[in-house]
Image (cartoon, helix red, strand yellow):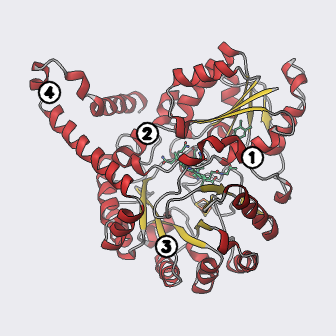
Amino acid sequence: MRLLFFNPIPNLGLSLGAFRSFYAPMPPLWIGYLGAIAKRYTNDILAIDNSIERLDLQSVFSRIKEYSPDIFCISVLTQTASFAYKLARAVKENIGSFVIMGGPHASYFAQEIISRKIADAVVIGEGEETFAEILENFDDIRRGNFRNIDGAVFFSGEEVKRRQRIRDLNSIPFPAWELLEKYFRYYKPPAPIKPGSVLTFLASRGCPYSCNFCMVQLGRKYTIRSPENICDEIEHFCDKYGTEHFLFCDPLFPPSKNKGLEILRYINKRGIQKITTWSIEARVDIIDYELAVALRESGCNLVALGIEGGDDLILKNVNKGIKTEQVIYAVRALKKAGIRTMGLYMLGTPGENEDLTIKTIKFARSLKTHGAKFAITVPYPGTELYEKYIKDKYSFSDDHWEFFSPYTDSPPYRMIWTSVSPKKLVKFQKMAYILSNISIRNIAIYLIERPSEVFGTLVHLLFGFFLKVLTKFRVSLRFFKHPNKFIVFKDYGAKNRYLRQDSI
Ligand code: B12
Ligand code: SF4
């Protein structure tokens, strides 16, 4: 049985523009986990990570054709749906592979994907057990003898029984990172983590909170690995690869102060802080000085905080369940304990007007974190925002999904939940990045630790500016008969505008 895993990425130009130099590709955990399951059934496995390869559709297709897998596995996020659908169809129809899809977007649209014959099977939610059952019964399934497999959709209109979440996370094998070794030198931790070899990590799954912009892909039920199992994996990969940083991708870790202290004391006792560093994304209401010190002493050197907004009304409207005073307290505690901080914010949240947007930017600036990211609110399928404002109101074509981006100024839907226009939000977003990230301390960190990325961004900005000036004088460019070279930026705008008119 020959199996291929393919990790797609969104259009980076659209997502990050001039800041794409700072894009930090990271080892995709889904390939690690499902690869470990697949290895029980076959050794003929190939993984292509397109966040590194950056191949276009035609080149990817040729690579896949060369390998001709029996099973083609692809993960689908909303922004990658258009690419993933086209590729899956081509592979299914022209190579004849059995196509399996999974991931957040595919889970939500499983029935539609199957009825449109884009894939042969869609795995909904947590993948390991369902995937194992498909591989176990693959010969039967291939012959068309489908059995009912909980958590997977095979037939159009079929009722799917959701699989119970995996109770014992310690029973899941460690990610099969050997499948992605060829990419290791390209993976890098995002700023402001010191560059070095990096692996992604998952200590827990699920999140019981109900923020209305968030879709918790693996479910609301919270499960967590034992501290022993967490340390075993870290030690294993430090031994094997000398990994310098583990990037925890948990939606909620630690789950509470007390549970956090218990785990951190164990990590510290095992001496993890002597062999590597790690970082987490946390809720502010869990952090206090005692926990911050315990984090620092067990090797954690960056905490990204889901702050979202700079006013209590915003936090209430997104159902975050925190207050700005808790944000201030958590940032202070972390900084005092010697941990770098990153603030994660949203602009254009429900009920937001320009005054509130400005308040968020001012608040972010006042916190003086080591980094700040600003996403324009996107109603991803599976979120409360999507159910309320998008579902049943729009009919999107596959290409529209690419524009479900936290960086676009013309999304294919109307952001009726906020009075700030998308174009204004993008301007605010740029301003927010500059105002909240630029300080003498941060510039020093970036210049010392990431000079090539700073240089790359400056070149992009200057080049972009240069192109803009040139496109303004298109008439004179035509005179020189080279206009096509200069329409790159215009192209995106035009496509986007078309999408809006088309869909409203
Ligand atoms: C780490 C992370 C990233 C990393 C790396 C992503 C990567 N390539 O792995 C970075 C920072 C690069 C990133 C970027 C983005 N991300 Co992100 N990211 C995450 C995060 C925090 C963890 C993902 C993860 O690894 N989880 C652990 C693994 C094991 O879970 P999993 O991927 O869901 O896979 C399991 C199942 O879904 C299933 N499965 C998944 N794929 C497949 C495929 C097959 C064939 C099968 C059988 C099963 C299967 O089995 C797996 C094991 O159980 C999630 C939030 C979260 N906590 O889940 C957001 C999340 C996935 N990201 C999100 C978004 C929006 C983005 C961006 C588009 C944002 C942007 N514009 O900049 C980009 C897109 C990048 C891309 N590659 O497409 C959204 C996706 C929403 C959506 N509907 O698409 C999420 C859910 C966050 C959120 N709550 O909104 N992200
Ligand atoms: S934003 Fe964070 S806390 Fe809120 S539901 Fe999502 S993962 Fe949970």
Kind of residue at badge 2? Tyr
Q: Are marks 3 and 1 in contact (CB under 8 Å)?
A: no
Mark sitting earlier along the chain (3/1) = 1
Residue placed at 84% from the left, 59% from the top? 170
Coordinates of residue 406 in the picture (x, y in percent): 44, 48
Residue placed at 89% from the left, 23% from the top? 139
Report which residue position mark 2 lands on. Answer: 413
SS at circle 1: loop
Q: Nearer the viewer, residue 429 or 451?
A: 451
Which mark is in front, 3 or 4?
3
Q: Is residue 276 above or below residue 366?
A: above
Report which residue position mark 4 lands on. Answer: 474
Kind of residue at badge 3? Arg
Q: Is residue 227 above or below residue 186?
A: below
SS at circle 2: loop
- Give me the disc on residue 176: 1
Which mark is in front, 3 or 2?
3
Q: In screen coordinates, is 330 left or right of 108?
A: left
Q: Nearer the viewer, residue 332 or 165?
A: 332
Coordinates of residue 45 in the picture (x, y in percent): 75, 32
| Label 1 Cα neighbours within 10 Å, binned few <14 / some 14-19 / many ≥20 | some
Kind of residue at badge 1? Ala
Coordinates of residue 13 in the picture (x, y in percent): 39, 39
- Give me the disc on residue 443: none
Q: In screen coordinates, is 24 left or right of 261?
A: left
Which mark is in front, 4 or 1?
1
Q: Is residue 475 above or below residue 285?
A: above
Residue placed at 34% from the left, 32% from the top? 492
Coordinates of residue 92 in the picture (x, y in percent): 68, 19
